[in-house]
Amino acid sequence: GALADPAEGLRDAARLAIALHRLWLTRGPLFEGIDYLERLRAAADAPDAPALDVLLRAQLLSGAAHLAGTRSLFSDAQALFARSLALYREAGDRPGTAATLANLGWQTWNMGDLDAGEALSREAIAIHESLGDSLGIALARNNLAWIATERGAFDEAARHFDAVIASHQARGDLRSVAFTMSWRGVLAARRGEVHQAVDLFERSIAAGDPVADIGYRTLVLVRLAAARHALGTSDEEPALVASAHLPALRGFGRLWPLAYALTELGSMRLDLGDVAGARTVLAEALEARRVSRGTGGMIETLTLSGIAAHRAGDLHGAARHLTEALPMARAYRAPPLAIACLEAVAPLAVAAGHPEHAVTLLHAADSALGALGARRTPRHAAQHAARRGALRDLMGARRFELACADDRAVSLDAAAPLAMDELHALLASGPAASA
């Protein structure tokens, strides 16, 4: 075969891999691509192998990084993109440098460093602007939109997403329009603008029908199902179709969309009272998250796992999940995720006999949510009102109102140590704390 020739054969094999990597990414034979690239890299690294030029090595590493990212092996993808970037810089290839900066920026923020991810993305944008590359600018700006979403800077995120959608529309790139509309829908859902989220998810499917990538197809369907569910107007079809895709995601090793879909399905099962079913799918989601290691998704799945454990009467298990989630959310500097953690800890404080602490945590979450310009979905607003009503009944009106007084309000940063104290106390009491 091509690899038998010690010189041109190796270079031809490398060029073939570069040409095929988009096919491997979008049409499913992912493991074929991974096996080919691994054998090619082994051949290239052999002591007697002919040297590949710098640009060819950069492209190979970039292709391997894309495949690792598609398999949700984000740490591997980050390391491969970093090596590829160094080679593109060495080769003086500015388009390759800019594209790889954007790809590395995505992996970097996804692995938990929002500031570094932003810096890499802005450097990519500067180079793309100098090259007049509107597509490159849009792809790098998409990173900025997600980073702003994670930080709770929702207006900034909306401006970025809308600019990206307009750029894709101007080029007639309907597939990218479809993807970005679905991501804009995630932002709307995070803000509590669920009607808009449903509209965006439906338009995403109509605009480009991203069925070519089963991972994204599953994500759009499960997001639509979750948004309809949050409105209380759901039909089961999107969730059922999304669930039907799960075996294929497992088979292709698509861990990130698998974990995301399972997390959303677990959340819906919790809302419907199926605690055992929720814990089953969340356990699989958490296992996938620990392999892929995406920070934001890990925090979300851990938080829901804590809520599910509490509802099952496993206070120790709930505390264990939330003790892992809350420090991650604080280090990630993502207020929406920290708010969700505090709200999940509040009922544990009640169970531990500290209802005033629960009120403090909920008050901090309410204040932070308002500062973000966000609101709860109708379903979650009703649940939150019921939680506060139960606290009022437990404490008595006067005691509850005193605990809710504005002069007792604390910030997220001030509330987090109180939440951690509650969790550590539960962990110290051991599994016997469970009801």
Image (tube, helix red, strand yellow):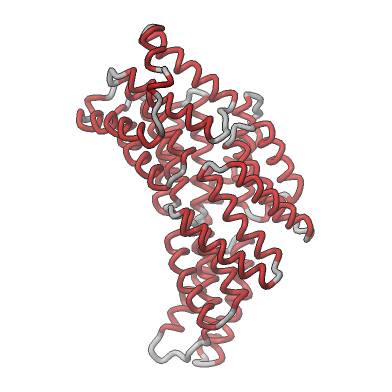
Q: What residue is rendered at 45% in x and 34% in y?
A: 339
Work out whether 224 lies above or below 91: above
Q: Is residue 291 left or right of residue 265?
A: left
Number of labelled discs? 0
Q: What residue is rendered at 47% in x and 53% in y?
A: 114
Work out whether 346 lies above or below 59: above
- Determine which quarter of the picture holds residue 79: bottom left
Give x and y (percent) for residue 192.
Answer: 60, 32
Tell me the quadrant of the picture where the C terminus can be found: top left
Query: Is residue 101 something one can see in this rendering?
Result: yes
Tell me the quadrant of the picture where the N terminus can be found: bottom right
Q: Who is closer to the viewer here, 164 or 72?
A: 164
Q: Who is closer to the viewer here, 105 or 33?
A: 105
Q: Who is closer to the viewer here, 267 or 342?
A: 342
Query: Is residue 304 something one can see in this rendering?
Result: no
Q: Who is closer to the viewer here, 8 or 191?
A: 191
Q: What residue is rendered at 46% in x and 78% in y?
A: 41
Give x and y (percent) for residue 340.
Answer: 45, 33
Work out whether 324 lies above or below 72: above
Give x and y (percent) for residue 427.
Answer: 24, 32
Q: Is residue 53 left or right of residue 359?
A: right
Give x and y (percent) for residue 165.
Answer: 71, 52
